[in-house]
Image (spheres, rainbow, N blue to C red):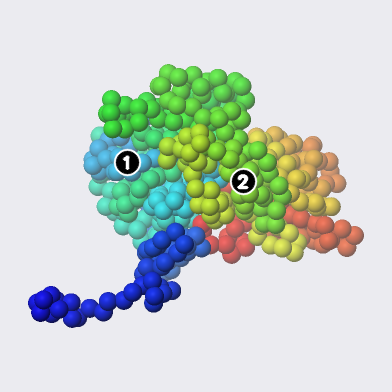
Amino acid sequence: MADKDKETEDFEIVDALKEGTDGGPVEITESGLTLNLGMGSEDEYNEAAPQEVSAEELRALVEVEEELNERWPETKIEPSLDRIEMLMDLLGHPERSFDVIHIAGTNGKSSTARMVDSLLRAFHRRVGLVTSPHLQRVTERIGIDGQPIHPRDYVRIWHEIKPFVEMVDAQSDVPMSKFEVLVGLSYAAFADAPVDVAVVEVGLGGRWDATNVVNADVSVITPVGLDHTDYLGDTLAEIAGEKAGIIKPREDADDPLTPNENIVVIAEQDPEAMRVILQQAVDVEAGVARSGSEFAALESRIAVGGQQVNIQGLGGLYEDIFLPLHGEHQAKNAAVALAAVEAFFGASAGHPLDVATVRNGFAQAISPGRLERVRTSPTTFIDAAHNPHGAKALGAALDRDFDFARLIGVLSIFADKDATGILTALEPYLTEVVITQNSSPRALDAYDLAETARDIFGEERVYVADNLPGAYAQAVELAEDAEVQSGSGIIITGSVVTAGDARAMFGKEPA
């Protein structure tokens, strides 16, 4: 008995039922004892704090960019996965070290990818994000933990993989393009982090896109339209076929411990495109979830700073979700993103994801350069719409979510895009347009674009400025007309570069 007393003499025995437990590691509740493990509340799971970037690190990034810009640009491709597959082999297959949700389509890819990323992080997954093209800085293309990769890590990983890239160059008839290198760099960075899952946006097409070296758990096809016809085909069916190339059979389908099929989540499509996408899913025995059938955005109500949406998901009904993005098209993108995350986690009818976590994930979603408000007086937005389908969605969103008496467009469009189609789609929504030229050598000459604009808008509604700051100043002058000033707005759009230039002009940090 004495030995037993000695063993316990250093410990204080407390009757928790009498003493109470407020603030302690164990809390007594009506349902019993609860462990306070300090896992954090919803509010604690916010974006990671951005890291400071030194001038020296930016100079090193510029040097690497100058080196990579000597390679083929994204506008020049040679359809083959041989080079990227060789690089992955030399690097020890980093693309196999994480799960993948792969996203192809014509419009909505970046917004959908960013919503998927935000949802996965809300469920406490470490996520890598690949998007393209970037708005301001190339590091935006590689996201880890909700932030662009730090320039010093970008530079470091490039120097680590550079000898292997040069080995691929030496073995290939065509050296690796810049985009192929960026994909290799992305997958190496994700393996280095490491991440649990990568959300990968296709660069161009799908079947021969360098990102398609992965075998995704979930493939997503956003709305398909006519774009990049010089590479992908002249019809919706041909373009859809290229994008559906990311839908693959599961590599480990014979393993009894893994699901026997990959899943494809399909947004609303033109029937011609839908037929091709579904045929590819059938051919590779992939499971299918279609917007409007297996899931849907049921309701979208305008709210301050965005919209309130109800979504019928694969697992059940998710109500009163705040989405801080404007436009009905973003509500539809949100439904696609949620279905992709549900499919990834294996949700099924009657077994939805935790709705509070879903709400938290959507509430923290961002989509820079997509109807992004950058000034309040006059109200100014920027948007990366660069084809007629995107321009139509932009116009509809502005018309539905805002009540401008006067809306001025500031536009610069690439020479290889359908400028007539973009301007025609925007014409019903814009009072005047100020035509300008962004910083890209691909930009259509402002005065040539203005001639096209005059044919669509009429002479009196078209103005021209040589550069974006001058064009915005002209738009502000128009918006501040005394008669309608209180109801005026400005939208800067026409291309991703135009949106990126505008973000920089307004002092926005890369995101």
Decide which of 174, 250 is in the foreground and name it.
250
Residue type indicated by callout 2: Glu
Q: Work out whether residue 359 or residue 501 is closer to the camera in this orientation and state it.
A: 359
Residue at point 72%, 50% (across, down): 302
- Residue 75, above or below 29: above
Residue 34, image x and y in percent? 40, 62
Dividing the picture into quarters, in which one does residue 378 lie?
bottom right
* Among the two numbered marks 1 and 2 on one chain, the one whose residue lies closer to the N terminus: 1
The structure residue drawn at horizontal position 31% and vertical position 57%, both measured from the top left corner, is 156
Coordinates of residue 115 in the picture (x, y in percent): 53, 47
Q: Mark 1 points at which residue?
A: 95
Q: Looking at the image, is mark 1 or mark 2 nearer the viewer?
A: 2
Q: Which of 362 and 403 is in front in this view?
A: 362
Q: What residue type is labelled 1?
A: Glu
Residue pointed to by mark 2 = 319
**CA–CA distance between discs 1 and 2?**
36 Å
Q: Residue 425 carries which label?
A: none
> At which x and y percent is residue 174?
34, 33
Along the horizontal axis of the image, is 186 left or right of 437?
A: left
The secondary structure type at the circle numbered 1 is helix
Name the one closer to the observer, 294 or 7: 7
Q: In which quarter of the image is the N terminus?
A: bottom left
Q: Can residue 464 be seen in this snapshot?
A: no
